[in-house]
Amino acid sequence: MPEGTAPPTRRALRALVTAGPTEEPIDEVRFIGNRSSGRMGVEIARALAERGVEVTLALGPARVEPPAETAQLRVARFRSAHDLEQLLRARLAEFDLVVMAAAVADYRPRATACGKLRRTDEAMTVELEPVPDLLASTRPLRKAGARVVGFALEPAERLERSALEKLERKDLWAIVANPLETMESPDISGMLFTREGRREPPAPRMPKGEFARWLAGEVLA
Ligand code: CTP
């Protein structure tokens, strides 16, 4: 390199990791939610930040403590699928890597009642509408060449078949398939599927932190 020429600076990779459940309001005090703890996504965000990636963690109303923010790891909060959709629409194009570990609702109340619904002796019906598939519907907003990793939570007997179908339908680089027992557990029995085939983690069942470090290595390879 000629003297006085600065070495080319390599910009750090930017990653968005989504984690946790969504809460879909019925009225101003009640919601429909799910049992996702948020732990897997938080661990993935940490593992990527440890490897020098600039991480934004989009964290829902999770039961785990949000990680402390650092220059390497920023936290943005969301509550409903609508909030997360807004965040994705505003910021998806910034990221070289997207890991969508959030357990986004598939249905939500069509309307949110004002205040608190009163109890009566009558049965009550809450009409639900489908939530758009955020991964698939924001496809055109992805940065060119971005690696997008989805999650598939499935009963063990159709884990692989469903994961491969979602990999295709959501146009992903890879998908982590994990059985329903992963929810609320400190461990995961996960498997990674890419277009090239299956990648096995070092152990069939691992603490989520260890699995996250293995996954970070795979997606950054
Ligand atoms: N996902 C999404 N938008 C939704 C629901 C899910 O972007 N409304 C994402 C999840 O974050 C995950 C992936 O899609 O990365 C798969 O989620 P999963 O719940 O397993 O699959 P669905 O597509 O919702 O299909 P189904 O519920 O029928 O299994």
Image: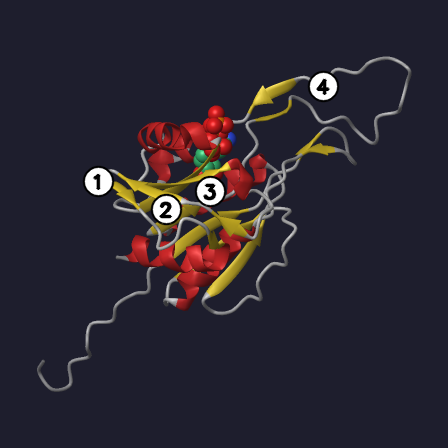
Report the disc number at residue 126. Answer: 4
Disc 4 or disc 1, which is closer to the eye?
1
x and y, in percent, of residue 219 in the image:
31, 53
Q: Residue furthest top?
A: 122
Sequence order check, earlier mark of 3 and 1: 3
User: Which residue was labeled with disc 3?
Assistant: 88
**Residue 47 visible, this orientation:** yes
Q: What colouring does the structure picture have? A: secondary structure
x and y, in percent, of residue 163 in the image:
37, 33
Sequence order check, earlier mark of 3 and 4: 3
Residue visible at 32% across and 48% down in the picture:
200
| In contact (CB < 8 Å): disc 3 and disc 1 | no
User: Which residue was labeled with disc 1?
Assistant: 196
- Location of the C terminus by quadrant is bottom left
Give the class, few, some or many, for how many residues have Cα within 10 Å of label 1's Cα (few <14, many ≥20).
few
User: Which residue was labeled with disc 2?
Assistant: 93
x and y, in percent, of residue 209 in the image:
48, 59
Label 1 vs label 2: CA separation?
Answer: 25 Å
Of helix, strand and loop, which one carries label 2?
A: helix
Sequence order check, earlier mark of 3 and 2: 3
x and y, in percent, of residue 63 in the image:
66, 51
Report the disc number at residue 165. Answer: none
